[in-house]
Amino acid sequence: MNPQETKFQFVYDEIKKEILDGILLPGSTLPSSRMLCDQFHVSRYTINRVFDTLREEGLIEIRPRLAPVAAKGKNGPGPSNAALEILKHRDGILQVYQTFALILPPLLVFSLQGCDVEIMPHYKQAMKVLRMRHSLGGWRLPSKLGYDILKIGGNSLFSELYSTFGLYNKLAFFIEECPCFAKHLSQNPAEQTRAVIDTLKGSDPRIMCSELSRMYQRLADSIESTLQELAGTMPEIPVQTGTPFSWNPMRGQDYYYSKIVDDLNMKIGLGEYAVGTYLPYEKQLAGRYGVSLSTVRKALSELEQRGFVKTFNGKGTVVIEPDGTKLYQLALNSGYVEKALRYLHALQLMVLVIRPAVSAAKRFTGEELDRLADRFAAPGSIPLAEIFEAIVKHTTLAPLRVILVQTSRLLGWGHHFAYYPSRQNVLSQINKKVIEGLGQLREGNTDSFADTMADCYRAILVRVKNNLVKVYRFQDAEKIRIPQKH
């Protein structure tokens, strides 16, 4: 396993690199403490420590009651080189906008269901723009309104993703430093805000999602045209040196032992380690995961506390039927409740993003579909895992690929809730859906296949929610909404 970083060290390294690499230009405002807390999944105390350290190094300036701004570091670019620095990151920036044009509309529409956009904190500012019809930063105000909606929607992963988008999209540069952006967008701030407000006040989720998709795609197209125009002003196009898109919702929680717990839990839940079989010996597990024996023992101890395994001295650790009583007792633990909600939120997210991800992925060849069919037929095959891996490989947008992989990692935590009891019955139903989807791909019907994949994760979410509420009396799960098919 890769070496772990402290929360402080990771956040410090990320922000410092953005300043020194010119991603955060001199004089530009850093994201708010709240956004950084959401993005990095850390406390405000950690963010303030990072700010203090960067200030001591002369990399940022902190002013009373104002957000920190980037100062010129030793290797930092001057303001005149802003366009050059942006062009060094142009491919990554464009892919961020293209990714969020795909996934933000369904997230926004789902989050807004049951809520009134007029209660959002930035709604009054938006209405002021409409009354005064003056420029207040183009897409900046609709962007803040979008954050309000995702924050109030109840799924913390949505707002974390949105905060991450804010770290990578360089919207401030395009609004404040790049006059040609407004030309390519061809819509003044008041018009943009009115269009967003009118759409968010809609009552038909399908129409709302379609309109928002059109708006965000126009934004992505405008960014692409702006970057092309900027490139045309340079004697030569800079070599791409951009920082890869990064989103890790498990940061600060992905301890070595918990990674082992989640991996073994997934393999037990999906039947790779069936009830009655022994797990590999502790030394074998330590070698496989690259950790110490004490870390392996801690992981096995937690699995035993959950009621999934039983360790016998001198014999090893055997997989047993999950113990509902132990799981119910764990559900009373606040830390366990937080993880359970995180798992349910990840299922919500997967239901909403898998469909646009499939639609945007490059097409499967006949040969690839034949290989998938062969793997589905092999003993011990897990079709949903197989097809998901294939979708990830076909995803050309790097940020979207990161989102899919990290969301899938979160899903490793709760396979026992999804598949027990009656694991075989549930798995057979999901496998049947996946095989049906493979047939749709063979017929060239990508939209139907995308719907089928969303249906698979939706079915798992429905089962998990019901299982947690009825079997384990986990009342917090009652609040989890099921994304509907539009």
Image (tube, rainbow, N blue to C red):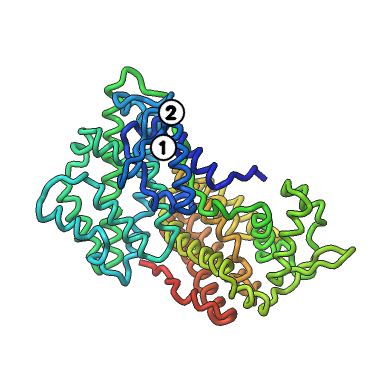
Q: Which mark is residue 240?
A: 2
**Residue 308 as seen in the image, left or right of residue 404:** right
**Horizontal side of residue 409 vs 46, given as left or right:** right
- Point 37% across, 65% down: residue: 153
Judging by the rendered image, the residue that carries numbered circle 1 is 92
| Image location of residue 151, percent across then percent down | 37, 61
* Kind of residue at badge 2: Gln
Residue situated in front as seen by the camera: 133 or 198: 133
- Occupied quadrant, residue 309: bottom right
The answer to whether residue 225 is seen in the rendering is: yes
| Disc 2/disc 1 C-alpha distance (Å) | 9 Å
Vertical side of 419 occupied by 282: above or below? above
Considering every residue shown, the one lying at the far top of the view is 235
* Disc 2 element: loop
- Classed neighbour count for the residue bearing mark 1: other residues with Cα under 10 Å, few (<14), some (14–19), many (≥20): many
Neighbour class for label 2 at 10 Å: few (<14), some, many (≥20)?
some
Q: Of residues 449 and 223, which is closer to you in this image?
A: 223
At x 71%, y 59%, the residue is 299
Which amino acid type is marked by label 1? Answer: Gly
Residue 481 horizontal/vertical position (percent): 42, 71
User: Which residue does the image show at 35% across and 32% down from the upper left?
Assistant: 25
Point out which mark residue 301 bears: none
